[in-house]
Image (cartoon, helix red, strand yellow):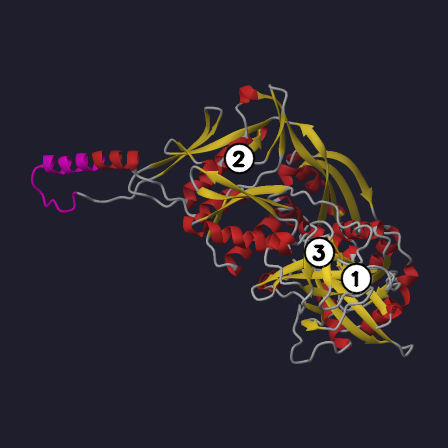
Amino acid sequence: MKQENIRNFCIVAHIDHGKSTLADRFLEVTKSVNKRELKAQLLDSMDLERERGITIKASAVKIIYQAKDGDKYQLNLIDTPGHVDFSYEVSKAIAACEGALLLVDATQGVEAQTVANLYLTFDHNLKIIPVINKIDLQNADIARVTHEITDILGLSQERIMPASAKAGIGIEDILEEIVKVIPPPKGDPQAPLQALIFDSKYDVYKGVIVYICIKNGEIKPGSKVRMMHTGNIYEVKEVGVFSPKPLKVSSLNCGEVGYIVCNIKNAKDVIVGDTVTEEKHPATKALPGYKVVHPMVFCGIYPINSGDYVDLKSAMEKLQLTDSAFIFEAETSIALGFGFRCGFLGLLHMEIIQERITREYDLNILSTTPSVIFKVHGTDGICRDVDNPTRFPESTEIKKTEEPFVKVNIMFPKEYLGEIMELGTNKRGVFVSTEFLDESKVQVLFEMPLAEIITDFYDKIKSITRGYGSMDYEFFDYRESSIVKMDILINGDKCDALSILVHKDKALTKGRALVEKLREEIPRHLFKIALQAVVGGKVLARENVGSMGKDVTSKCYGGDISRKRKLLEKQKEGKKKMKQFGKVQIPQKAFWAALKI
């Protein structure tokens, strides 16, 4: 395919605005997939994506389109996620493209992630084609959404494309617009090879499959290539494209998107954002790559069976290959043994990773309460980053503690303004500004502690606004805050897996909620279990899990009362001994319940 007939583009939008459905229609209209193989959310290959109806991984596919001008065009489409926790996947896809379709739901209008994704495309100077989707629905308000796109996003009204991905309306018009508006790749086919690694995947038989976008030169099987960041040299065994299944080709030329197989067995040898070049005629400098992503949420993940530790480590290395925003390091816990401290971009990201470990690698795992990175300034003058409650120093060793604050942008119908303001205040948010976008929609900006929004904040926004609210956040700075470590004692023994770092003003409320939930989730044992929430030796809350009843006097049929008393005293002594030496079994669902609090 001639370079001037190649178009690289992605679809960006807020979650559930119809990205995957639009990609399905492109494949159907261009006959890129047989009707037998066509199914909903075709590019969402994971069962988890299909079940939840969300895109987790950016997916690439090559489409051949016969345009109305008579020429054939190669359209390389990258379908991207919409949830804020997977914005790194969006940024990777954008770096491999020259244009983007900005999809807006005709019933929901412009939402927070729509704006955030648009700014990402501006950073890379992409050509934007705005598309209003779901125009066939009864409650579609095309006039209002058109006004929002032109007024809020500042895009031209003449360029807006109306469509319905589900009904197949306006699909060919969008394809024609892609051909006309989005420019071809600018690279030089005669220059030394420069290929950007935008993703990778581990295959049991082929090793690491490296997803690349050719910026300059070309690549063929048999070529000797070098990764410019690591310096490792490999021989290319296979070159291919996605259509949408992997398809071998003779070469990948300048501007094309595809994959290479080099028999790379170690997952750590491939770095997303690295540049692939030829060994004999290397490029003088590497491509810019991606900015380093910093995880926002941390938790411990432990195997329930200690013998699965090595398998869990291997599973995490392979997951890190497909998701470079996920990081981990080894750690130990008194209560849980050997495990890993893991970093995620958000709570949904954490939930998805844990679900993938369980499903894809058949491992039973247990996770601890999530936390963020606090900066602890010690009396010794050293500032430490603390993401694990077990590493939090004693109060006598702390000079001051700082916690991360984020700018939270919330968009919602104006009738919910009072409730959203109250929610933001309850979460220790600092109000910054209110902007009325039009007669029905308002945007509120808060500066808020990250620790307050990583758990249930987004769910509460959706609940308050009946599903019409949306949010986006970005890191702002660190601010001094009164953070304390709250431990949970189970029969007087500290369970470090349930320890949390919490703001001083919220310690009492969270402590009570935590022990009450644990009382509900921990099954009754043969002895009474005392649950206590403690801060610095002071007990803030206490609950008891009652012992299981056993009628030891049932075998006594009358006779003297002293016989019954003797049996009851014997039982009392046995329970006291059991409480002293017995172990409390805490089920995984108790940890999950604590996590949600």
What amino acid is found at the position of numbered circle 2 in the picture? Ile
Would residue 403 be found to the left or right of residue 303 on screen?
Answer: right
Residue 339, above or below 540: below
Left or right relative to 32: residue 150 = right
Quickly name the residue at label 2. Answer: 500
Task: Measure the alpha-carbon separation of dots 2 and 1.
Answer: 47 Å
* Residue 352 appears in the figure: no
Where 234 falls versus 577 (above or below)? below
Range drawn in magenta: 553-572
Residue at image location 92% in from the left, 77% down from the top: 69
Q: Main secondary structure of the magenta part?
A: helix
Label 1, on which residue? Answer: 214
Secondary structure found at label 1: strand
Query: How far is the residue under mark 3 from the one under mark 1?
Result: 26 Å
**Residue 34 against residue 264 in the figure, above or below:** below
Looking at the image, which is closer to me, 70 or 426?
Answer: 70
Mark nearer the viewer, 3 or 1: 1
Q: Residue 342 placed where, x, y %? A: 57, 44
Q: Is residue 51 left or right of residue 85?
A: left
What residue would you read off at disc 3? 82
